[in-house]
Image (cartoon, rainbow, N blue to C red):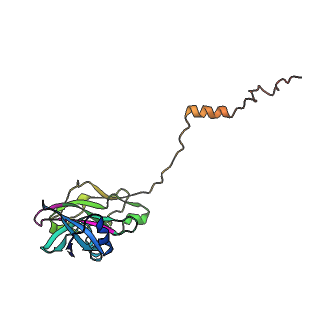
């Protein structure tokens, strides 16, 4: 994937005018080099980012030639969803890198048809690989989840060649279980509060009486 860029001379608060003109301010970092100020056309970035995300190598086209990078940070306006800035990290193709790759669960768990509940514990996996071997996603089939307690661990899946998981093999990715409704029991009332409530039920004008006797009434 290739993404065209242009050198950026507009900095600070003046980048608002840049955004209005259809550009996104970007910064390129990597390998002890001085960071570079770039700008990217909003339409082109939106398309590439939708395909590559933050897990696929993107060749940045600059005046010096193509530079392999990863998109490592995207800032957006929480109200308008407009792209505000982009951070790019230059990578070396001969160095392994660590990153988190999304997990895509595929298929339908047979146990789900029996009324069991599929619980997806995580939606990404930390891996290490050479840039050329980085997968855009890890697919995990749910077809083996049939009975209550069936679980898929990291050690149960086959990773692409050259990709190593950076978590323990026993790490749970997804499991299936019976759906049990939680029962909430009313907490017992504290003794002091219960005693106070009992006293409130007694009125000062109604003393304890024995049997059916009436209190004496003065004449």
Outermost residue toward the left?
A: 94
* Image coordinates for residue 201, horizontal then vertical, percent: 68, 34
For the stretch drawn in magenta, the main secondary structure is strand
Q: Residue at x 53, y 41 (%)?
A: 187
Q: Nearer the viewer, residue 47 or 79?
A: 79
* Image coordinates for residue 130, horizontal then vertical, percent: 14, 65
Q: Write the start and end of the magenta stretch as one range.
A: 83-97
Q: Residue at x 45, y 54 (%)?
A: 180
- Can residue 140 be seen at all in this image of the molecule? no
Q: Is 190 left, or right, of 42 in this rendering?
A: right
The answer to which quarter of the image holds residue 40 is: bottom left
When the figure is inspected, residue 212 is found, relative to residue 36, above or below; the finding is above
The answer to which quarter of the image holds residue 199 is: top right
Q: Is 172 left, or right, of 89 in this rendering?
A: right
Split into 4 quadrants, where in the image is the C terminus?
A: top right
Q: Nearer the viewer, residue 218 or 165?
A: 218
Q: Nearer the viewer, residue 107 or 167?
A: 167
Outermost residue toward the right?
A: 219
- Can residue 216 be seen at all in this image of the molecule? yes
Q: Nearer the viewer, residue 78 or 141?
A: 78
The answer to which quarter of the image holds residue 7 is: bottom left
Q: Is 120 left, or right, of 3 in this rendering?
A: right
When the figure is inspected, residue 181 is found, relative to residue 210, above or below; the finding is below
Q: Is 200 left, or right, of 46 in this rendering?
A: right
Split into 4 quadrants, where in the image is the N terminus?
A: bottom left
Q: Residue at x 33, y 73 (%)?
A: 20
Verify whether residue 91 appears in magenta: yes
All told, the count of numbered labels is 0
* Image coordinates for residue 49, horizontal then vertical, percent: 27, 71
């Amino acid at each position: 994937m290739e993404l065209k860029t242009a050198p950026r001379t507009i900095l600070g608060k003046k980048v608002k005018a840049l955004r209005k003109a259809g550009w996104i301010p970007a910064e390129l970092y990597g390998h002890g080099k001085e960071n570079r100020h770039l700008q990217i056309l909003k339409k082109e970035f939106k398309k590439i980012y939708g395909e590559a995300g933050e897990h696929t190598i993107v060749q940045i086209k600059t005046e010096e030639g193509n530079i392999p990078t990863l998109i490592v940070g995207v800032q957006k306006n929480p109200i308008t969803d407009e792209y505000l800035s982009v951070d790019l990290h230059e990578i070396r193709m001969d160095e392994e890198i660590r990153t988190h790759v999304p997990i895509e669960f595929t298929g339908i768990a047979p146990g789900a048809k029996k009324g069991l509940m599929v619980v997806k514990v995580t939606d990404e996996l930390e891996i290490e690989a050479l840039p050329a071997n980085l997968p855009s996603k890890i697919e995990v089939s749910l077809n083996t989840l049939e009975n209550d307690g069936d679980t898929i661990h990291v050690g149960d899946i086959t990773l692409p060649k050259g990709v190593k998981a950076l978590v323990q093999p026993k790490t749970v990715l997804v499991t299936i279980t019976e759906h049990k409704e939680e029962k909430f029991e009313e907490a017992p009332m504290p003794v002091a509060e219960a005693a106070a409530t009992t006293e409130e039920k007694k009125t000062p004008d109604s003393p304890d009486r024995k049997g059916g006797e009436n209190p004496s009434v003065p004449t």
